[in-house]
Image (cartoon, rainbow, N blue to C red):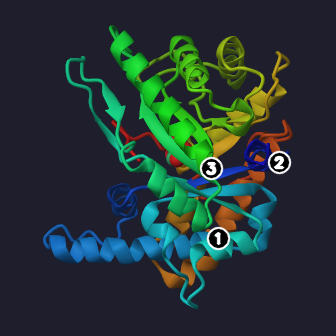
Amino acid sequence: MAQLEELSKIANAIVAPGKGILAADESTATIGKRFADIGIENNDDNRRLYRQAIGKLYGVLFQLLFTSDKVVAENISGVILFHETLYQKADDGTPFVELLKQKGIIPGIKVDKGVVPLFGSEDECTTQGLDDLAQRCAQYKKDGCDFAKWRCVLKIKRNTPSYQAILENANVLARYASICQANRIVPIVEPEKVTETVLAAVYKALNDHHVFLEGTLLKPNMVTAGQSCTTKYTPRDIAAATVTALNRTVPAAVAGVTFLSGGQSEEEASVNLDAINKYTGKKPWPLTFSYGRALQASVLRAWGGKPENVKAAQGELIKRAKANGLACQAKYVAGSVKNIASVDSNFVKNHSY
Ligand code: 13P
């Protein structure tokens, strides 16, 4: 069937050898925090002005990312956009979507409407946005998007994730995936903070909803130690734990796995992805990146809000994309690509997108 063929073609193109995703779908609030980190536009005494400034700066950042050299496309197959960015234009009037397509990069869109509390649970959550998703997907497809992202968050604590949260989030992800596919959009399924139990529930729900796995991608975290853990694990340990968990739960039919960076430094995210690809266990899917912070930390630092730094900032993106392009082929040599913020932690407590 043409629709299924189209879905697997898109999914396979995203995880083509040496390529991965730039996740640039930060909400306006999150991008505001990132700008505050680099010390620009901290207008907290004037909220109105601040919001206006953030809106404008948000556009500037994307212009910086998307007008970079064509060479970025050698390692970036897709970019996840936030709704607002999808309809923004570069200074010369070219819509950002067009800029991406001209470079052979596939535009994607974040379609969830954020994480909300799950009443009756121990501080767990679910993700909203299903109500008008079919109409939005139809429109996004018309406007040039071929894939989508929906993020669910599972909390790993002593008593959680609970059965309630696992079931709820798996079902929401399955409904989202099914609605996307009905509209010829490849769904990235993102149950952030995975455990084997969570992944098993997610794939059961996807099966219950007849989701075409060959036209989906999984976006999990790597299995790394928690921030407060004092034991140091090597990239090989992380690779072994990650590949084992995925092998036990992710069907071989899934088109690919695109990891989030989840607070790792740019360098850690490249080294660990490389170790995962070097690991000699069974790996039936391409294993690549869909990084937000680990592809943008140095870009933001180099740019610092100054137009004269745009070229330098774009250079940082090209370098980091190259490092990850090598890592997803098990060819990255640790420390061989140096960026200005590549060893800084990107950890943010209670992080949201
Ligand atoms: P990080 O790589 O910053 O964890 O974010 C990835 C993400 O989920 C955005 O789409």
Q: In the rendered image, which quarter contains the N terminus?
A: top right
* Residue 23 percent coordinates (x, y): 57, 52
Q: Nearer the viewer, residue 87 or 329?
A: 87
Q: Which residue does the numbered mark 1 point to in the structure image?
A: 314
Mark 2 or 1: in front is 2
Q: From this viewpoint, which residue is outermost toward the front?
A: 1
N-terminal of the two: label 2 or label 1? 2
Rendering coords of residue 338 (x, y %): 70, 54
Q: Secondary structure at mark 2?
A: loop
Instruction: Please say if the residues under marks 1 and 3 sit with CB atoms less than 8 Å apart.
Output: no
For marks 2 and 3, the one nearer the N-term is: 2
Seen at 24% across and 23% down, the residue is 123
Q: Is residue 32 above or below residue 289?
A: below
Check disc 3 and report the residue beneath it: 185
- The residue under label 1 is which amino acid type? Gln
Say which residue label 2 marks.
18
Badge 2: residue crowd in 10 Å (few <14, some 14–19, many ≥20): many
On screen, 228 above or below 22?
above
Instruction: In the rendered structure, find residue 145 and report the number of the disc placed on it.
Output: none
Label 2 close to label 3 by CB (< 8 Å): no
Relative horizontal placement of residue 243, taking residue 281 as reference (left or right)? left
Residue 188: name its quadrant.
Answer: top right
Locate residue 169, reporting x and y percent.
42, 26
350 horizontally vs 306: left or right: left
- In the image, taking residue 155 as reference, residue 183 lies left or right, namely right
Q: Amino acid at mark 3?
A: Ile
Q: Is residue 132 above or below residue 238?
A: below
**Residue visible at 43% across and 31% down?**
172
Beta carbon of the mark 2 residue lies under 8 A of ligand 1: no
Judged by depth in the image, the label closer to the viewer, 1 or 3, is: 3
Judge by depth and name the residue closer to the eye, 207 or 255: 207
Which residue is outermost to the bottom?
A: 92
